[in-house]
Image: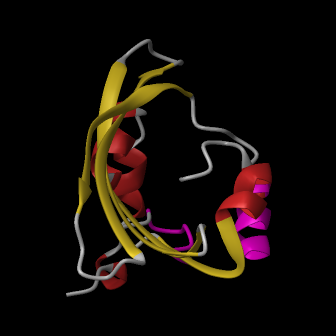
Amino acid sequence: MLLGGAPEIADELYVDDVVIEFPFARPGMPNRFEGRESFKAFTSAQSVPLPVRFEGFRNVVIHDTADPEVIIVEYDLAGTVTTTGQRASQSFLLVLRVRDGRIVHLREYQNVLGMAAALGQLPALLASIRPDSVSP
C-alpha cells in the first residue's frame, strides 16, 4: 500500500474525501476506502506488519495520459522476506488522479498471488477462495 507502513503521511498525500481502491485485494480484505480517515484507520489497525524489508523501486515507468490530473505508474517493489531471507520482487500498477498536488483517487493493482507465494501464504490464500466468492 502506498503508505509503506507510515499512515501519518496520509494527510500530506490524500485529500479528505479521497477514494482508494484495490481491485485485486485478497479475499477478506477491503477493496475500497472512501475518505482519508477510513484508510488511515484500516492501515493503523493492521496489527501484523508484512515481514518484508523493502529495498527499493525498480523498473519504474510513468505513462503519459491525455488528462493532466491522471498519472499511471508501473513499478516493481523489491525486498527481502525477513522470516525466510528470500529476496522477492512484485509488480504494481497505480492509476492516480491528482489535484492541487494531492491524491483524490488511487487505484492500485498488484500481483496478489505472487505476493502470497513470496510470503509463504499461498496455500492459505488459495484455501480462502471459495467458488461463490469469485466473479465471472
Q: Is residue 28 magenta?
A: yes
Q: Position of residue 97 (x, y in %)?
A: 46, 76
Q: Quarter of the image holding residue 25?
A: bottom left
- Is residue 10 rendered to the left or right of residue 20? right
Q: Residue at x 42, y 78 (%)?
A: 69
Can residue 89 be seen at all in this image of the molecule?
Answer: yes
Question: Magenta stretch?
Answer: 26-44
Please name whichever residue, 30 or 13, is drawn nearer the observer in this view of the structure: 13
Image quadrant holding the C terminus, namely bottom left
Q: Quarter of the image holding residue 37?
A: bottom right
Q: Residue at x 69, y 76 (%)?
A: 15
Please name whichever residue, 98 or 46, is drawn nearer the observer in this view of the structure: 98
Colouring mode (rainbow / by chain / secondary structure / one colour): secondary structure
Q: Position of residue 46 (x, y in %)?
A: 72, 51
**Residue found farthest to the top:** 85
Q: Position of residue 76 (x, y in %)?
A: 30, 39
Give above or below for 109 relative to 58. Answer: below
Q: Is residue 9 magenta?
A: no
Q: Residue at x 36, y 42 (%)?
A: 115
- Is residue 109 rendered to the left or right of residue 47? left
